[in-house]
Amino acid sequence: MPAASSPSTAESVLDAPEVPEAAFEVVERVEDLLAGVGERAPDHLVEPATEALTSGGKRLRPLLLILSARMSEPEEDALLEAATAIEVLHTATLIHDDIVDRAETRRGLPTTVASYGREIAVATGDYLFAETFTALAQIGDSRLIRAFSEASHGLAAGELEQYRSSGANVEVEAYLDHIRMKTAGLFKAACVAGGTLGGLSLRQIDALATYGQALGIAFQMSDDIMDLVGKPGLMGKGIGTDLVEGTVTLPIIFALREGDAATIRRALADPDPSPDVLEAAIEAVLATGAVARTEAWAMGEIDAAFEGLGLLPGGPERKVLEAVAAEVVGRSA
């Protein structure tokens, strides 16, 4: 079994003594602002929006933004608004993902669509998208709007590509394109926005972009592993969720090439596989070297993330970014 990350990557890093107190305080203030976003929603959306925003996410994207910004001296109000906005955008994407996937639970709780129905869930996600860009307009920095817009475009395109490829033959490059858009895009946007708010040089912001994208790719690959090895995933999914949804991840791609493809495809093709069919498919994947190959690829991405950090100012913020990257693949920093 691989030494992949636990589901509490952000929390374990936040608990570490090297986290700057100022950064920790900003994350705590973001929690209050997220509650405020829910409270000012239209009447019928207050409850679902508040539940979605305060359901106990890891706040990893706000943390990345804050740490990137605090390598210099960002303006505090803009930093708070941007850190809140990245989590609001992330929450909106989760709601819409759950609608498309018809997901019943996330992080052990009912999803917005399961609790309130499709119409309310769609409206809640749309409201959160709108709130994201309202906050960015108040900050008034076109560079942040560009970074968030590019990430939003990638999220939409990535979700569409995943839907189209569910249950079908998927090549490694198509998988990588998908996770670059859907998962890594928000990590990259958080780091770029933070570096921009901190007034870092273009070269340093590019280094943060490299770090964010590589971290996001490794994060998704680690989650894909967790979906198979018997632990809840980093994104709050259950065991075997990808197979149930017909989602072809990197370890599944490798296993289809190396192992009992017929057993794996049986689960992918069935919209409601029985426990026996699902267990057989998981065992067929684990019987190959697919998990080890995926973990090795994730570690390669983390190496790229560390390389990007080498151009950034030294200090406690950089050390925590290094620790975040190390936690994703469960290795020593």
Image (cartoon, rainbow, N blue to C red):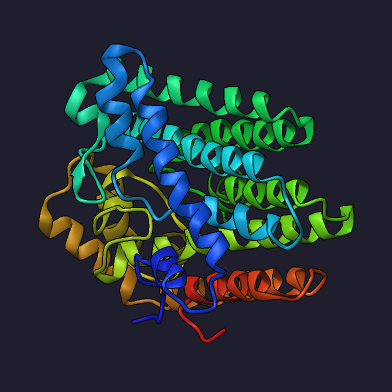
Where is residue 158, by image quadrant?
A: top right
Residue 330 percent coordinates (x, y): 45, 79
Total number of numbered discs in the rendering: 0
Residue sitting at x 20%, y 23%? 116
Where is residue 319, by image quadrant?
A: bottom right
Residue 35 percent coordinates (x, y): 36, 35
Left or right relative to 297: residue 125: left
Q: Is residue 146 above or below residue 223?
A: above
Q: Which is more toward the observer, 258 or 332?
A: 332
Residue sitting at x 83%, y 55%? 200
Q: Assign the C terminus to one quadrant of the image.
A: bottom right
Q: Assign the N terminus to one quadrant of the image.
A: bottom left
Q: Is residue 153 above or below residue 70?
A: above
Q: Which is more toward the observer, 63 or 29?
A: 29
Left or right relative to 276: residue 229: right
Q: Residue furthest bottom?
A: 332
Residue sitting at x 88%, y 52%? 202
Q: Is residue 44 above or below residue 321?
A: above
Does residue 211 appear in this view? yes
Left or right relative to 275: residue 325: right
Residue sitting at x 37%, y 70%? 259
Residue 310 percent coordinates (x, y): 78, 75
Residue 17 percent coordinates (x, y): 48, 79
Does residue 94 appear in this view? no
